[in-house]
Image (cartoon, rainbow, N blue to C red):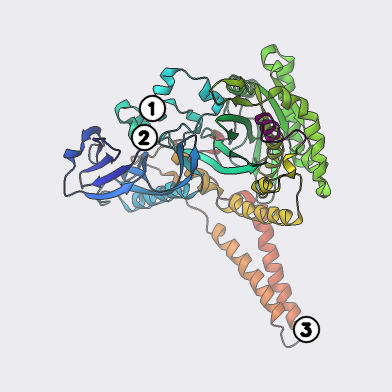
Amino acid sequence: MLKFRMHITPEKFYVEACDDGADDVLIIDRVSTEVTLSVKKDIPPSAVTRPIFGILGTIHLVAGNYLLVITKKKKIGEFFNHVIWKAIDFDVLSYKKTMLHLTDIQLQDNKTFLAMINHVLSVDGFYFSTTYDLTHTLQRLSNTSPEFQEMSLLERADQRFVWNGHLLRELSAQPEVHRFALPVLYGFITMHSCSINGKYFDWILISRRSCFRAGVRYYVRGIDSEGHAANFVETEQIVHYNGSRASFVQANSRINTTVLVSKTKSQVQTTATDQQSSKSCMDGFQRHFDSQIIIYGKQVIINLVNQKGSEKPLEQAFATMVSSLANGMIRYLTRNLLYIAFDFHKECKNMRWDRLSILLDQVAEMQDELSYFLVDSDGKVVTNQEGVFRSNCMDCLDRTNVIQSLLARRSLQAQLQRLGVLHVGQKLEEQDEFEKIYKNGRTGKRTQLGLIMDGWNSLIRYYKNNFSDGFRQDSIDLFLGNYSVDELESHSPLSVPRDLKFLALPIIMVVAFSMCIICLLMAGDTWTETLAYVLFWGVASIGTFFIILYNGKDFVDAPRLVQKEKID
């Protein structure tokens, strides 16, 4: 297990490998930015020393280069004798010793960029291991060559899931320093030691979020010309019992159509995009599924959007594109691509979650055909997973969670029976202790409390969508390298002034609404006086609300670093 110690002087950063017998020291020159490898005796005694748990990478901002390091970690568990860590705190260290070379505007821009980097680092979900490749599924790792096994974790990692890939670009160019460069996964990992019928097994869930075309709900959707789907997530469920390992992989992303989704203050409007020709749209769609079939095998697409209302055009567009592939000359693709539309909200309205069995029954035979990956205790591959279920909805949130949970449970039932953990005829739902693992997940047994939580989460999302999405999207684009800071740029994208009305009107609306409530609680001498005050402040608050609503797009916090055309 790699351990590190950082030594800081005004001229250089020294990162020392603290493993037994290790003598390597990574030296980063704070002036020339040169990266070299040396030995421990070259560390000056005067250096300030602090422990760190890994290098996240470097990034260039207005003030110059910054070094990002992991300063605190939490053990998630052990994965086949490999320790998995969650990075929970970071530090951003400037190469420069002073900011006197910056103008006031540059100082403000640099402060904003730093806030963006720290915002991404504050988001929960960064995981790493110093000895295990978290970016690949068990099945992919089983099909690798001895040469692949000898590569460093950075070299062999699936670049789709290395969220600090851009930050490590300088270190990745020097193979001799790769041991200091940790590929970091963004997503979710949980591990549980479980017991059924007195037999103990490990249940592990890994969700890997792609760093290609990543972003917030309304600004990043669909698919680009390179075939990258918005917010693609690969989820792997793993069972480890008596040396045998079973894995079931699923995928999801935001709706894969070339439909432009534009946000206003109150609604999502769907219009056909005129930014790409139909040919380039289809090229991107085909390119995406070309790569998906190469990586995963057959694709069973489950589209969960509504088949009426504002989501109807999205479902129709998606179905049309799949049909266009089927009617084309891409025969190998259509043999490996199956489309299923399931109107989740219509089928399950009035909390009829039992109706999800309609979809499960429809795909049961397909799931048995796709199977799952299983390797025995001797390392022999027993079965391979031949394809994946690909769940799609508007935002990869509630609907996909429900369906993925049910499909994963069905696969787990089959795996545990095959491994001998479950007896013939036993159902996973009957195992109360194990069911507690799923209690916070989305199963067919939904409650009124769950609906209340949905409502609360929706309110939180609404606020973020309207008032912080732009900053969040800019933060992601900066972190992932979609935008590069150029200190010589004459016009900073952060310096675009906003009209005072965008600040004044929301304040007026809040004040007017507050005064209306106060007038109701503190009645005047007569009811006519009270009514007059209530009507005045009520009309003021409602009037400003409708002005804001009418000019919704102008009040929404939009991204400033990467133009909208480059995202949709």
Q: Residue at x 70, y 36 (%)?
A: 422
Q: Earlier in the sequence, mark 2 or mark 3?
A: 2
Circles 1 and 3: CB atoms closer than 8 Å? no
Circle 2 Cα neighbour tier, 10 Å, few/some/many (<14 / 14–19 / ≥20) = many
Dot in front, 2 or 3: 2
Q: Earlier in the sequence, mark 1 or mark 2?
A: 1
Specify the segment rendered in magenta.
Answer: 412-425
Report which residue position mark 1 lands on. Answer: 152
Report which residue position mark 2 lands on. Answer: 181
Circles 1 and 2: CB atoms closer than 8 Å? yes
Asked whether residue 362 is in view, the answer is: yes
Q: Which of 46 and 557 is in front in this view?
A: 46
Q: Position of residue 103 (x, y in %)?
A: 31, 51
Q: In which quarter of the image is residue 407?
A: top right
Report which residue position mark 3 lands on. Answer: 527
Q: Where is residue 41 in the image (x, y as percent from the top left)?
A: 16, 39
SS type, badge 2: loop
Dot in front, 1 or 3: 1
**In the displayed structure, would residue 489 be above or below residue 318?**
below
Query: What's the CA distance linking mark 2 and mark 3?
Result: 72 Å
SS type, badge 3: helix
SS type, badge 1: loop
The reply, left or right, for residue 40 in relation to residue 287 is left
Query: What's the CA distance linking mark 1 and mark 3?
Result: 78 Å
Q: Which of 349 and 368 is in front in this view?
A: 368
